Each structure stands twice: as structure tokens, then as C-alpha cells.
Amino acid sequence: MRVGLFVTCLVDLLRPRIGFAALRLLEAAGADVVVPRTQTCCGQPGYNSGDKQAARALAHKLLDEFQDCDYLVAPSGSCAAMIRVHYPTLFADTDDAAAMSRLAARTYELTDFLVTIAGLQTVPGTFAGRITYHDSCSGLRELGVRKQPRTLIAKLPHVDLQEMHEAQTCCGFGGTFAVKYGDISARMAENKCAQITATGADAVVAGDLGCLLNIEGRLRREGSQKTRVLHIAELLAGETPEST
């Protein structure tokens, strides 16, 4: 399989280790991975803010970069959902509708691809301890990503998955939501962190870096230094801070 890895803006700028972890997992699944050097943004911030012209321009750029790939994979439910769910709508009734629909149909969130398409049987991670998993909104509600990360976590023999209460409830990030409705977002993050802490987990894991940044910021402001905050790709690939 020729698989295009869409790294995402946040990963590229704030935690590139996630990109390398995703690459390692895709290669472990037998994929021939392509990472275009010119890739930037999927257009989601512009789309969510009503700037459809900017979103379309970035979508065209992304299509050009990944059109020769059998699949497009992103370590982010929100970015994958932007392409898979919203590109067809964004380009409906245009000359590019068919091309964007084809791109959308072969776009997957990382764990969904590894389980549904690649059928990955073993993962290279070696994490040991208790973790809890936060279900990111876009991956869960737009792409149906829930069982896939847990299926992969179960392949780590020394990991104890302790489900938090209301794991499927939003952490309060929501991209521009956190900026527009800061007080509401902060309270949602506070509630989420209370649920995480109650599990006694050594680490909280999720599939979207935006959620993780929001959660980690709140945990650290509350004085919690014990709970690590990891992307699912880092956990599964063994690309955690201690190993890099």
C-alpha cells in the first residue's frame, strides 16, 4: 500500500514526535509511506470560521500532494474528518466534487486505518502502567472511532486500561470554540481532568493533539505533574518522552 501521511499542523509545530510515531506504525503495518514536504493545513480552521475560500485553496493543495496515494492517513480525528466528511460538502456542485469525494473515501484516522484496513497484529510500544483513554469528539462522532484505539491498546501486554467516567464527553477544546467560549471551555476541561485523576492513571491517552494540549494545560495548572499526556501513536509506537 502507498499511504500518504498527513502530519497535521499541530503535530508539525508542537509535537513532531507524534508524526514519527505514526510513521513507525504505518511501516510496521507494511505500508510504503509518503510524507510530502510541502504539506501544511487541511483547511479546518478556515472552514470552521466561515472562510470557505481559504479552506478550498488548502483542500486543492492537499489533493495535489496526496492524489497518487492509495490511502491518506492522519493521526487526528478532526483533520481526518475535515477531509472525509467536509470536503465533499465544501466542493458539492463544483467541478472538483468527484475528485474530492474520491480523496475523502480513502482518508482514515490513524487507528481506524491500522485496524480496519491494515489489520495490524502487533505494535512496537513497550509502555507499562495504567492508562485512561479520552475519546476525541470529531473522531468519535464523525468517524466512529472508538473501538479501534482500544483494540490496539489491548496489544500492549503491560498496559492496564482504566476507563474514565464520561470518556466520550468533550474536553472543551473544540478548536476555535476554546477561543470564543473560554469560560465554558475551561470548565469542561476542569471536569475532564477530574475524571482523569479519579482513575489513578499514569497517563491519559487520546487521538487528537488539540485535546491533549488542552487537557495537559489544565492538569499542569491544577498542579498535577504525575499524569502523563500521550497521543495514541506515541503509546503504540513507543515514542514516549523517555525513549527519545
Image (cartoon, rainbow, N blue to C red):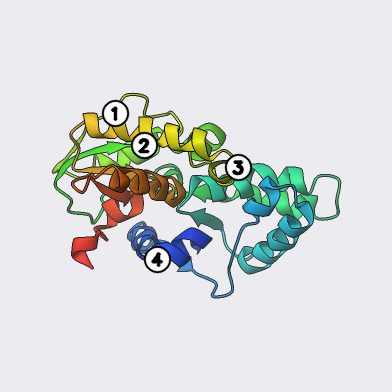
Q: Residue at x 53, y 41 (%)?
A: 174
Tell us which disc is closer to us: 1 or 3.
3
The residue labelled by disc 2 is: 134
* Foreground tag (3 vs 4): 3
Residue 32 seen from this side: no
Residue 226 falls left or right of residue 64: left
Q: Secondary structure at mark 2?
A: loop
Q: Is residue 201 visible?
A: yes
Q: Secondary structure at mark 3?
A: helix
Residue type at mark 3: give it: Lys
In the rendering, at what x and y percent does residue 206 appear?
Answer: 37, 43
Residue sitting at the far top: 165
Is the residue under label 1 in contact with that under label 2 (CB below 8 Å)?
Answer: yes
Residue assigned mark 3 = 180
Task: Report the quarter where the C terminus lies.
Answer: bottom left
Badge 1 amino acid: Met
Whole-number angstrom distance, CA of label 4 to CA of label 2: 21 Å
Q: Amino acid at mark 2?
A: His
Q: Residue at x 23, y 44 (%)?
A: 224
Q: Kindly identify which residue carries mark 1.
A: 164
User: Which residue is tagged 4?
Assistant: 16
Q: Position of residue 213 (x, y in %)?
A: 40, 50
The outermost residue toward the bottom is: 37
The alpha-carbon separation of the residues under discs 1 and 3 comes to: 27 Å
Q: Crowding near pointer 3: few (<14 within 10 Å), some, many (20+)?
A: few
Residue 137 x %, y %: 50, 36
Using a 10 Å C-alpha cutoff, classify the residue at mark 1 as few (fewer than 14 neighbours), some (14 to 19) or many (20 or more).
Answer: many
